[in-house]
Image: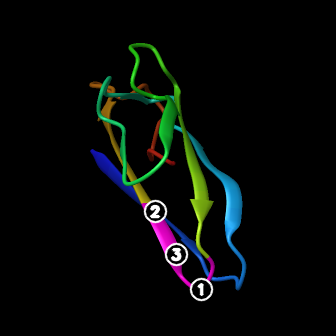
Amino acid sequence: LQYDVSVRNLGNQAGLATFLDDSVDASSEIVPGSVVTSQGTIVDGNAPGDTAVSVNLGAIAGGGGSAAVSFQVIIDNPVAEGVLAIVN
């Protein structure tokens, strides 16, 4: 499963030191090396065993500036008993 996240600044000033942090569902794991970003630095998410994605996007221009982050997860197979949805 691939997640594609768009971060957009609709304000009229630059967003400085912008971060994206995302924890994945307990019934899934991040595919090591799958985190990519259109700008900035990947802090967490690309190493085996990482349970969250963290990207330092830096500055995002005001007036509609944006950045994109994508990553892949593998869903447990089988999913644990009682799990009805994978939520992120």
Dividing the picture into quarters, in which one does residue 74 lie? top left
Residue 25 in sight in this render: no
Element type where label 1 sits in the image? loop
Q: Which residue is mark 2?
A: 67
Q: Position of residue 20 (x, y in %)?
A: 59, 49
Say what amino acid the circle numbered 3 marks: Gly
- Amino acid type at circle 1 is Gly
Q: Are marks 2 and 3 in contact (CB under 8 Å)?
A: yes
Residue type at tag 2: Ala
> How far is the residue under mark 2 from the one under mark 3?
7 Å
Task: Read off the residue under disc 3.
Answer: 65
- Please tell me whether residue 25 is drawn above or below residue 88 in the rendered image: above
Q: Quadrant of residue 8?
A: bottom right
Q: Is residue 46 above or below residue 2?
A: above
Stretch in magenta: 62-67
Crowd rating for badge 2 (residues with CA inside 10 Å; few <14, some 14–19, many 20+): many
Closer-to-camera residue (83/3): 3
Q: Position of residue 16 (x, y in %)?
A: 70, 59
| Image quadrant containing the N terminus | top left
